Image (cartoon, helix red, strand yellow):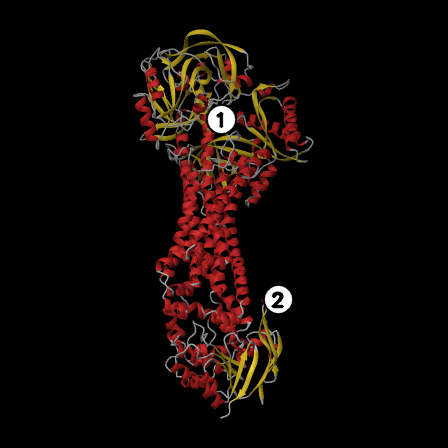
Amino acid sequence: MDILTVSHLTKIYGEGEAATRALDDVSFSVEEGEFVAIVGSSGSGKSTLLHLIGGVDRPTSGHVLLNGADVYARSDEELAVFRRREVGLVYQFYNLVPVLNVVENMTLPVALDGRTVNAGRLQGLVQRLGLAGREGHLPSQLSGGQQQRVAIGRALMNAPAVVLADEPTGNLDTRNSCEIMQLLRDSNREFGQTMIVITHDEEIALAADRIIAVEDGRIVRDERIRR
Amino acid sequence: MNATTNFTVKSLRANKVRTLVTIAGVALAAALLTAVLTTYASLNDFLYRNEAALAGTWMACVEADDSSVLDERITGAQADPQVFGTAIMRDIGFAELTADQQDTQGTYLAIRSIEGDVGDICGIEPSEGRLPESDREIMLFATWNDYGGVSLGDTVTFNVGQRVARLAPGEEGSMSAGTMSASWGVQGEAHESEITDGAPLNSSMGVLEADIDGGIFNEEVTNTEERTYTVVGFYDRPGYALSTAAGMVGVTAGAAAPDAFTDVFLTLNDVTNTQQVEEAAEALFPDEHVVLHTAMLRYMGVSSDSSIWTTFYGLVVVLAAVIVVACVSLIFNAFNISVAERIKQFGLLSSVGASRRQLRRAVVLEGAIVAVIGIPCGLLIGLAGCAVTFAALGPALAQLAGSVEVPFRVAVNGWVLLVASVLTFVTVLVSVWIPAKRASRTNIIDSLRAASGSRVSRRGAARAAKCTAPSSLWKARGAAGRVLGVGGMLARISRKRGTGKGRAASVSLALAIVLLMTAGSLSVFLGTLTDVVTGGGELAGEVGVMAQLDVETPQGEGTADGDVQAGNDGATGADSAATQPAAPMTPEAVAAANNELFARQAEVFAGAFHDLSQVAGAEPVGWKMGTGLYAMLPEAMAGEALVDQENGMGGKMADGRVGTVGSVAYLDDAAFDDYAKSLGLDPADFRDPAHLRAIALAQGYGNNGSVYQLLNVLREPGTLEALTAATYHGEPAAGIGVGATSGEGNSEAFAFQPYLEGDDDGVEWFPLEEAEVQTVSVEVVALAEEAPAIASARGEGLQLIVPESVAAYQSFGNDAPIFYGYFDSADGDHGALAEELATAGSAYFHDKSPYGLAFYSFNDYIEQRDSNQMIATVVNVFCLLFAVILALIAMANVFNTVTNSLILRRREFAVMKSVGLSNRQFRAMVAEECVAWCVRGLVPGVLLSLFVSFLLWQVISGSMTGLPFTLPWSYVALAAAMTVVAVGASVAYGMHRCRADNVVEALHADAV
């Protein structure tokens, strides 16, 4: 069953002569529980694609359907709710709130949604992410790998329909990269969590179920890895 | 352009809004400093020119008696390089004047010759015609033209001789005569010379008249010869040089007698204090008496000794300090933020090899560029502001300083521009120093990683460590969390855990409040000062008429009873010498006669008011009568104004009571009733002939020459005794004087001293204890804070207010009240109304009054009020301009800090948005921060303002004691409103910037 359908998605930055076509009529769909790697050179439009799927940006034209609902038919306020509940975002530079500690960062989407924190799920995630004992630490007191694990925790906390990761290992050493990828892979396998990961790392890409290659804002290759 | 400069210029261009706001801040700082200093310099320049016009530029005047070496010394002084200029005036002689001439011109015409640049140095300027050029020409005071019938080109002939002292009959010995007039802004040690019989008297010595001055000498003019002069000019400003103790000067030229008394006026080069001036003058003229022109020296910056000058100087210092503090804060904030925002750039520069010095230089250079652009703009704005203000208010300012002939203009002063520039530049450098050091200390790794920890304080980390229990996570804490939800909570957490940087906004807000309150306090205190100086008070009517009757000159026929025996003329001082009683009188009879006479005059005045009210266009406001009062009151009742003899209003008497000379205002009954009711009193209580009651004013302003004082006149209600008549062996006193008696053991007691008419126009004092006196008790039932409009504003001493009907039976010992009638004009033409009232009044007093008229005059109060209002306008406009500019600085500061504290965190906001922070939650978060900024700015702001207001109050109290310390509440409200507006505008802009930033871009802003 398709959990995500992207149809004719186009994003143009700027106007007139300065206009840049970051995404050009992109269409594809993702099945529930799929692990998709998006590859492409720098500036190919893959990050734009990810942000459009995540409801962070608005497309110039086209549609994104998540769980059958059109993402961009929502108002800004509804879109904020969508981001809290339906997607989890992980960035290369972690993007944690500096004044919040580990558990606060992880539960921020829950808090923004006005719900109470599921203590069991939080504990489980903290254990799973290897952050036990660091619950009260601030981002500045953590290593890069740890910060990225907090970001993943934040993305997974709400059990979203899809986790979107933008070069999650791009800023990490090999050992940390492996650990992070393992975490993403595990949550994909164990919880059936749909994952879309942008990466430059061939190894990571090869670990995915499917690789979509983007160049100049278009999909140039879409292949499923057969195992 | 090297790399550092290039980088600096680019970063300035990249942040246009902040660069412009910062330049504007620097420009405003320079403008304000320039304006304050220019105002100071212009006022100084104006006072200097004013003093120069009135009294000349002389610094020291040598009064030379020793003629033997005088010419030699004058020649020596003129050759001395330290002497800039000299002017000489010598006594030629004294012209005897006729009785008529003496009435308008003084006892003598002191004829003096001039030599040197008397125009500049002595301020001798003909108002008409020219200066005399020979000993046959003369320039006279303008009154000779106005009253003496002398015109330009006329010849005048005088008997001119030498004044000589003559022992009064029956006296012998000698005495010393002091000469010194302190009223011309001059200062010198008492110049005493020994006077013996036959000694010549010069123009520095007052007229000797033993009967009047109580001395032993009279004087006469000897060796007179007839001299004829052609009148070539008149002067209307006597200044110091043209008015002598013996009379106004007739200015001529030509040689004087070799031993003539001579004044040498000197201006000197390169003197920095009064002592130098004095020493230089004494060195040139040893053993001669030197008078210093202190007013002039003060304006030249050579001396500063008066309290009003200290107040002025203190004000300038306080204002300049406030401006500098405000600007340091503004510029410091701007650069601090600029550096914090670019910390990554500095790390990058550092990583490619920029030295610490280069980084520091980049920031300092940034400051310097801003200063170089901002300061010249500021100087121009400041000068232009002053020019516009002075052009609009110049005439009023000139009037405020007591001159209409000398224009008030902008004095563009090199040192003012220099000081303003340097002070602003130093302000910029000081502000930039700390950010520059921070930039130079940038840790490459930290800054490139943009270690987010820099936003969290150590205490914040400790707090964060405690919040880990899942059950307590995101529990609404504080009012913010409860009202504003998770947005408010986020803001609260951010504030509690953040480093102090967020406080910059609060600090600038606090400062904004301080700045506005400073302007407010200045306005309030200066306003009060102006009010006092200009008399203040409400206007009773547009036009006022005043009259006093001459009861000894019956008018018309059938008014024989107008010639009433009158003994005590009280405060009016009217001459009652012609009415010697035929038979011994008791004081009771004297008082009764006065009361009767007084009552009849009151009827005349009531009729006058009635008649004047019929004048076309006149709208009667009310009338009153004013008289004097000799009061003796219990010490507990009297305020310090009366008890302290130095105030000159009264003092403690030998019997322990306090004596004072005060006044009584008889208000017309309607006005009195309104006034009494406004104080919650029953007007009927004040009309009992058997029990006199009055309302009194509690306080009065006094001025002892340098300090205005608001003093307590009365402390509490009570009963006082008024002296209504005194007789000495059956003879009524001609008047009552005031003096100190030599009471036993209390030689300085205040005392009333009645006197009788003596022989030869003299007076015969007798002690009160030896007199038979009549007194009347008056109960002061209430003390009022404000006088009714129709009674004049607060006087200086005791002032009782009673209804006019009291005049029918009680005169308080007076026989000649002064009438005041007040009228508004129906059509607004107060000038014409004043003329009409003058005519109608004269006609009434001529046709319908049984008595003659001592005087009748009118006052166009509107005209006076307009000029007073102009002064108030000047003060208000000054304060308003100051407030506006300070408000602009404060707003710029708040804007800078608030917008930047938001913009700096835009990535943080983007993160929150990307995980689902809705716009509503974002607004709630920002709203919470705004409230926190305002609250945290308001409290210290108000406290600091109190302190600055207190400082200003202290400075102004230096020239006016008793000024109440009040807070300018309207400005407090304005400050609060401005705070809200400034924060609102800044937040709107900041949020706009944050929203305009694509969340995606903001999230990636981390990448260098």
Which type of secondary structure does the marked residue at label 2 adopt?
helix
**Quadrant in which the N terminus of chain B appears:** bottom left
Q: Foreground residue, B87 or A187?
A: A187
Which type of secondary structure does the marked residue at label 1 adopt?
helix
Marking on residue B735: none
- Residue B930 placement (x, y as % from top left): 50, 63
- Residue B70 placement (x, y as % from top left): 33, 16
Residue that label 1 marks: B570
- Residue B743 placement (x, y as % from top left): 34, 29
**What's the residue at 52%, 54% (across, down)?**
B973
Above or below B172: residue B120: below
Above or below B65: residue B385: below
The alpha-carbon separation of the residues under discs 2 and 1 comes to: 99 Å
Above or below B883: residue A123: below
Q: Are marks 2 and 1 on the same chain?
A: no
Amino acid found under the numbered disc labelled 2? Gly
Q: Would you identify the image quadrant in which residue B599 lies? A: top right
Q: Would you identify the image quadrant in which residue A74 lies? A: bottom right
B575 on left or right of B860: left
Q: Is residue B581 visible?
A: no
Q: Nearer the viewer, mark 2 or mark 1?
A: 2
Q: Foreground residue, B596 or B442?
A: B442
Residue that label 2 marks: A16
User: Mark 1, chain letter?
Assistant: B
Q: Characterize the local packing of mark 1: few (<14), some (14-19) or many (20 or more) Cα atoms within 10 angstroms.
A: many
User: Mark 2, chain letter?
Assistant: A
B70 on left or right of B896: left
Outermost residue toward the right? B616
Above or below A177: residue B118: above
- Residue B601 placement (x, y as % from top left): 58, 27
**Quadrant in which the C terminus of chain B appears:** bottom left
